[in-house]
Image (spheres, helix red, strand yellow):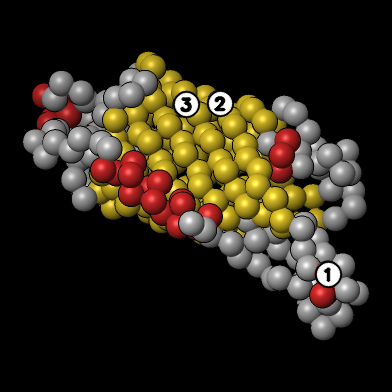
Amino acid sequence: MSFKRFGLATLIIAALALPIRADENLPDQRPRLLLDSEIGSAASLGFKFPATSFGPSIELPFENHFEFQSSALYSPDQKLITNDGNALNVSGAAIGFVNSRLGIIGKLEHSSLWTSQFTETNWAPSAGLVLRNNYLGQGRLYATYVFPTGCVWATTTNPCPLQSKRLQGIDLRQDARFGPHQRWGFDFGLYHFCDQSNQNDPAAGRHCHIGGSAMITLSLELHLGKPSLSSWKRDDPDNF
């Protein structure tokens, strides 16, 4: 089974494993502004320990079954190969909920990495499932597959200065509330990616690896606006 098929099978199993109740109350529809932070390890992806990032994000639910998300995360992480660096990841996502528990998400992320020796940018589209749950408190599980993008060969006739790593793989993220304005969770990624090849010897091919990241997340959440009358009548007015 290929790496991509394994990822898609994981998403399907995750969806089937969650009991779905059609009679559950709809979530709070107020926009949510978050101040996010995370810390963990991405050593197998070439970064020094610990890996950290922080920045704002916003969640905009509407019409009970849809939601837009946008985020910007700055990371001062240093690359092992250059002993310096910083990065900025900007993303946008759209979610369509087929019922009160299960949703389908599409996401597009742009990452920029600056070091003293090179600058690297990349687009990372992904798609998967969102599962509302109570595993760690009221929260969500995001299970997505990241698709590879970017140039394969860097030659004298190819304008891209660096080859794309062709990174692809599975990302699992759990968010949970532990207070009216606090969230915590984890983010695990398992990826397949490739090193730079010798542009003067394309026949030598590229060396590829499997690596991952493991992060603990913590967010401060602010609700924008007042809850609707129906929200006050629910047993779980802070559901998201």
Kindly identify which numbered label has been placed on residue 185: 3
User: How far across and down, in percent of the image, does residue 145 sit?
Assistant: 47, 52
User: How far across and down, in percent of the image, does residue 49 sit?
Assistant: 75, 29
User: How far across and down, in percent of the image, does residue 8 sit?
Assistant: 41, 54
Residue hosting label 1: 204
Q: State which mark lies toward you, 1 or 3.
A: 1
Q: In this rendering, would 156 be left or right of 97? A: right
Is 20 rendered above or below residue 91?
Answer: above
Whether pointer 2 and pointer 3 mark residues with C-beta atoms closer than 8 Å, the reply is yes
Identified at 59% across, 32% down, the residue is 214
How many numbered marks, from 0 up? 3
How far apart are labels 2 and 3 at the CA level?
6 Å
Q: Give the image quarter of residue 161.
A: bottom right
Q: What secondary structure is found at the residue carrying circle 1?
A: helix
Say which of 227 and 40 sits in front: 40
Q: State which mark lies toward you, 2 or 1.
A: 1
Identified at 17% across, 29% down, the residue is 231
Say which of 89 and 33 sits in front: 89
Give the amino acid type for the residue marked by disc 1 in the picture.
Ala
User: How far across and down, in percent of the image, does residue 20 sit?
Assistant: 18, 38
Kindly identify which numbered label has been placed on residue 23: none
Give the amino acid type for the residue marked by disc 3 in the picture.
Gly
Q: What secondary structure is found at the residue carrying circle 3?
A: strand
Nearest to N terminus: mark 2 or mark 3? 3
Residue hosting label 2: 216
